[in-house]
Each structure stands twice: as structure tokens, then as C-alpha cells.
């Protein structure tokens, strides 16, 4: 499952928990927007992409909880803080990430 966040009319953040290998994957479209940083609003987790194609991290409970609650995206001198997802979306994201680790 991917959690897709429309940062504005042009940019789209994708956060996914993938299998084989199990990892947390983030990418920001258009892909020319890098480096970029995705951080939880609480500051408990952040992931930085230095190259096109996105970034990966280990799937941890802390990362999943933090990202499900809301994110802050920084690309260049622009910071975007889209609204937190609806509860159902956040719960579906957490379940999918839990399944990806199995």
C-alpha cells in the first residue's frame, strides 16, 4: 500500500512499505526534486533522498507510527506540511507496513 500525499498541485509524495526486501520507500514527484527530506511532524523519524528514485529505510514501528500521523517535506528552500491523513488511511498504512515485515 502506498500513502500518497498531494503536497500541492504539482508535487506528490509517495510513502510505501514494500516486501522482498521489506523496506520503507519514499519518493517525491517530479523526481527532479532532490535532495529532499521527509520527516514526521514530531521529529521522531526522518529520511533523506540524495538522488532521483527516492530513498529507503528499515520498517520500524516508530517510523510507521510517525509517518502515519503526518509529515513535513523539505525540498530545497521549500517546506510543505500537508494535512494529516484520515484515521482510516493511517490505520490501513500501518497494517500494510506490518504485513510487509512478515
Image (cartoon, rainbow, N blue to C red):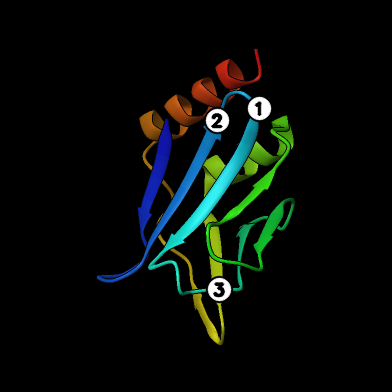
Residue 96 rendering spot, x and y as whole percentages: 50, 23
Is residue 10 positioned above or below 5 on the image? below
Label 3, label 1: how far apart the Cα atoms are: 24 Å
Crowd around label 3: few <14 · some 14–19 · many ≥20 (10 Å): many
Mark 1 lies on a secondary structure that is loop
Q: Quadrant of the C terminus?
A: top right
Q: Nearer the viewer, mark 2 or mark 1?
A: 1
- On the picture, is 96 further left or further right than 4? right
Q: Position of residue 36 (x, y in %)?
A: 59, 70
Where residue 1 sits in the image (x, y, percent)? 42, 30
Where disc 2 sits, the SS reads: strand
Q: Residue furthest top?
A: 102
Q: Position of residue 83 (x, y in %)?
A: 40, 57
Kindly identify which numbered label has been placed on residue 86. none
Whole-angstrom CA distance, mark 3 to mark 2, is: 21 Å
Report the disc number at residue 34. 3
- Do callouts 2 and 1 mark residues in contact (Cβ within 8 Å)? yes
Tag 3–tag 2 contact (CB < 8 Å): no
Q: Residue at image x 67%, y 62%?
A: 48
* Total marks in image: 3
User: Taking 49 as reference, is 1 above or below it?
Assistant: above
Residue 21: which disc? 1
SS at mark 3 in the image:
loop
Pointer 2 local density, CA inside 10 Å: few below 14, some 14–19, many at least 20: some
- Residue 71 or residue 14, whichever sits in front: 14
Q: Which residue is mark 2?
A: 18
Q: Are marks 3 and 1 in contact (CB under 8 Å)?
A: no
Q: Is residue 75 above or below residue 70?
A: below
Q: Which residue is located at x 58 percent, y 21 percent?
A: 100
Q: Earlier in the sequence, mark 3 or mark 1?
A: 1
User: Considering only order in the chain, which callout, 2 or 3, is on the residue closer to the N terminus?
Assistant: 2
Q: Nearer the viewer, residue 32 or 62?
A: 32
Amino acid at each position: 500500500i502506498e500513502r500518497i500525499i498531494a503536497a500541492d498541485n504539482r508535487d506528490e509524495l509517495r510513502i510505501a512499505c514494500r516486501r522482498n526486501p521489506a523496506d520503507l520507500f519514499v519518493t517525491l514527484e517530479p523526481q527532479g526534486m532532490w535532495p529532499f527530506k521527509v520527516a514526521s511532524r514530531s521529529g521522531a523519524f526522518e529520511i533523506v533522498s540524495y538522488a532521483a528514485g527516492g530513498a529507503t529505510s528499515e520498517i520500524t514501528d516508530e517510523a510507521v507510527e510517525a509517518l502515519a500521523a503526518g509529515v513535513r517535506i523539505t525540498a530545497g528552500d521549500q517546506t510543505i506540511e500537508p494535512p494529516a491523513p484520515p484515521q482510516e488511511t493511517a490505520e490501513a498504512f500501518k497494517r500494510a507496513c506490518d504485513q510487509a515485515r512478515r
